[in-house]
Image: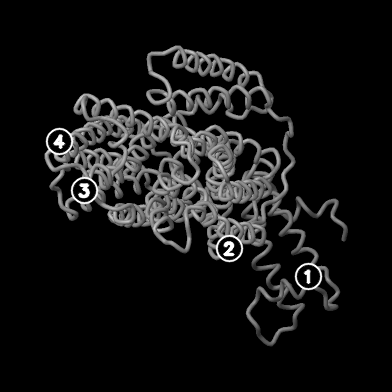
């Protein structure tokens, strides 16, 4: 298995078994980071009931998404400066410490702070897992392994609410284990990575782009705050909206200036001149909008409209989990075998659009089989598209930009997720307010309270939620189609490395032919002038003749006369007309 080469020299060559060992650590780390963002959803009502702070409800989830998104590009560049392995272990340490802090929280302020720190660690784990995979596996072979990464990402995102519901419902665990559950996995991942990941030390420019990091983080933070708090903490048409939008745009303009003048930028401007990076980032943005929007609001549909418990709603997403896993793994293996990858994100984003459309047709009386089939279609689409976009971006990037490219695409996907959650939430809220102007209120946020309503009122509320969800999923359809268009315009570049045959060696030049002829002539002369005593040269030349009754010296002289000398003359004659080889080399050669 060929490893990637870096600007500083070739990487260690990893065998299939060694790659699988590294993958085990990466997948454990990625599982813990992704679970941390999704497992808490079903536990939030219980947490708020114990710690209080209903007005801070949304921040428990938003704090992690916010810090994970804004820190992603920083982790990629820092790994270029200080090493992948070291930064990956730092991210694991940050994640473990933050998880323990969140689980030990005594009030909502402490919990939100722990969740924000947890998001920083999770951002490093999710970004660096992809970067390390890009370092140790060539793009052609990477499809074979990136399918597993994509499967872990999707499964953990979807299965998180199921695990959270189980933990909350289990009396012997409690909600604090929603944060503790990832700690053992993170520790095991750290041990595995320390043992099996051996990356060469590369001297790099250690200058840190402080101004770029500050402006990029400020721009992303302001945008995330606007998307998270807009429509809930303040009205969209309010001074806070315009203030945060202005801060985000101004910081973005300063970030562009900073990155154009920085000696070692976090997001090099040359990336945005790379058509593959731009299109995969745009497609990842739309995938994030559609994926996170569907995954966040589908459990609400199942619990509110279908009347399922948190655990049952998690189980209902299993068809999406299974199909996402299978499609991701199978497509990765096919890419490794064939070298063709574009068909998968193209088909995947079309299936995402179809899946969202099918979900928009669900209603109060829809059965579990129909819901499962619709979710399975969406799962196939996500499995075919998520990791292939990362693969395409890495394959189209220069080796020196591997970390920046990977973290950049991941950043846009997370940003799309934030846009999807906030945008779909605003759409649902506005639709409910228009459908239920007289009955809206806190009860609409509680599935148990809605199920306890009198039948005529309950039916009206459920129909309103159904129409609201229909609008949410329908809005996701054109968004997925925009991602489809971005992928259609991608150029399918051949995957580097792996099964691709190496380039043919250039034909020998005339000087090479003459040199080879002269060397053969020199060997022939030395053999012919040998005094018959045993020597390494005679033994080597004699082995070229079939064994017979002749002495070693006689066989060697026969080879020199019948093979070496004619071959020498033929090579020199092929290069250029010349006198006989013996005349050329006799003069000046020690006798």
Marks 2/3: CA distance?
Answer: 47 Å
Q: Nearer the viewer, mark 2 or mark 4?
A: 4
Badge 3: how crowded within 10 Å, few (<14), some, or many (20+)? many
Label 3, on which residue? 306
Marks 1/3: CA distance?
Answer: 88 Å
Quadrant position of the C terminus in the picture? bottom right
Marks 3/4: CA distance?
Answer: 14 Å
- Identify the element where label 3 is drawn: loop
Q: Which mark is residue 537?
A: 1
Marks 2/4: CA distance?
Answer: 58 Å
Residue 351 x/y as whole percent: 25, 43
Residue 93 x/y as whole percent: 65, 50
- Identify the element where label 1 is drawn: helix
Sequence-first disc among 1 and 4: 4
Marks 2/1: CA distance?
Answer: 43 Å
Nearest the viewer among 187 and 328 is 187
Residue 461 x/y as whole percent: 19, 36
Label 4, on which residue? 460
Nearest the viewer among 18 and 445 is 445
Sequence-first disc among 3 and 4: 3
Sequence-first disc among 2 and 4: 2
Residue 72 x/y as whole percent: 55, 37
Q: Going 72% across and 71% down the picture, which residue do you hit?
A: 541
Label 2, on which residue? 18
Quadrant position of the N terminus in the picture? bottom right
Is residue 501 shown to the viewer in this render? no
Q: Nearer the viewer, mark 2 or mark 3?
A: 3
């Amino acid at each position: 298995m060929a490893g990637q080469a870096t600007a500083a020299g070739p990487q260690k060559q990893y065998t299939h078994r060694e790659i699988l060992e590294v993958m085990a650590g990466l997948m454990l780390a990625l599982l813990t980071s992704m679970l941390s963002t999704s497992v808490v959803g079903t536990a939030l009502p219980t947490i708020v009931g114990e710690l209080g702070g209903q007005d801070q409800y949304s921040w428990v989830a938003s704090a992690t998404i916010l810090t994970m998104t804004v820190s992603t590009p920083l982790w990629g560049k820092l790994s270029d400066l200080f090493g992948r392995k070291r930064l990956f272990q730092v991210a694991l340490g940050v994640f473990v410490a933050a998880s323990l802090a969140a689980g030990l929280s005594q009030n909502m302020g402490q919990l939100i702070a722990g969740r924000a720190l947890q998001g920083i660690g999770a951002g490093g784990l999710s970004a660096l897992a992809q970067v390390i995979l890009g370092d140790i596996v060539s793009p052609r072979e990477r499809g074979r392994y990136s399918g597993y990464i994509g499967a872990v990402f999707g499964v953990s995102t979807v299965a998180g609410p199921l695990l959270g519901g189980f933990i909350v419902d289990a009396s012997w665990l409690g909600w604090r284990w929603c944060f503790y559950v990832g700690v053992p996995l993170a520790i095991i991942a750290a041990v595995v990575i320390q043992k099996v990941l051996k990356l060469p030390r590369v001297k790099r420019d250690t200058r840190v782009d402080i101004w770029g990091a500050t402006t990029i983080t400020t721009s992303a933070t302001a945008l995330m705050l606007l998307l998270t708090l807009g429509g809930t903490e303040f009205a969209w048409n309010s001074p806070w909206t315009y203030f945060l939008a202005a801060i985000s745009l101004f910081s973005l303009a300063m970030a562009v200036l900073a990155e154009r003048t920085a000696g070692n930028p976090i997001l090099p401007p040359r990336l945005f001149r790379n058509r593959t990076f731009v299109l995969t980032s745009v497609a990842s943005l739309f995938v994030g909008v559609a994926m996170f929007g569907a995954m966040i609001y589908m459990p609400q549909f199942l619990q509110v409209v279908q009347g399922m418990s948190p655990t049952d709603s998690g189980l209902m997403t299993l068809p999406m989990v299974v199909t996402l896993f299978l499609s991701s793994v199978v497509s990765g293996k096919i890419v490794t075998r064939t070298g063709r990858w574009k068909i998968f994100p193209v088909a995947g984003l079309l299936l995402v659009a179809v899946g969202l459309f099918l979900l928009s047709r669900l209603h109060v009386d829809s059965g579990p089989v129909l819901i499962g089939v619709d979710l399975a279609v969406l799962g196939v689409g996500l499995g075919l598209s998520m990791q292939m976009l990362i693969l395409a971006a890495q394959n189209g990037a220069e080796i020196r930009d591997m970390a920046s490219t990977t973290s950049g695409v991941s950043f846009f996907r997370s940003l799309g997720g934030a846009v999807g959650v906030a945008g779909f939430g605003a759409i649902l809220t506005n639709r409910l307010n228009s459908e239920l102007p007289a009955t809206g209120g806190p009860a609409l946020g509680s599935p148990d309270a809605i199920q306890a309503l009198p039948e005529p009122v309950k039916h009206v509320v459920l129909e309103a939620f159904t129409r609201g969800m229909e609008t949410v999923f329908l809005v996701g359809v054109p968004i997925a189609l925009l991602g489809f268009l971005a992928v259609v315009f991608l150029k399918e570049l051949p995957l580097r490395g792996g099964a691709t045959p190496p380039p043919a060696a250039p034909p020998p030049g005339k000087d090479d032919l003459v040199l080879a002829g002269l060397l053969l002539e020199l060997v022939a002369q030395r053999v012919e002038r040998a005094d018959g005593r045993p020597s390494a040269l005679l033994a080597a030349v004699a082995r070229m003749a079939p064994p017979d009754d002749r002495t070693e010296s006689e066989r060697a002289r026969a080879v020199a006369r019948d093979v070496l000398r004619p071959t020498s003359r033929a090579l020199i004659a092929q290069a250029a007309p010349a006198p006989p080889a013996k005349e050329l080399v006799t003069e000046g050669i020690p006798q």
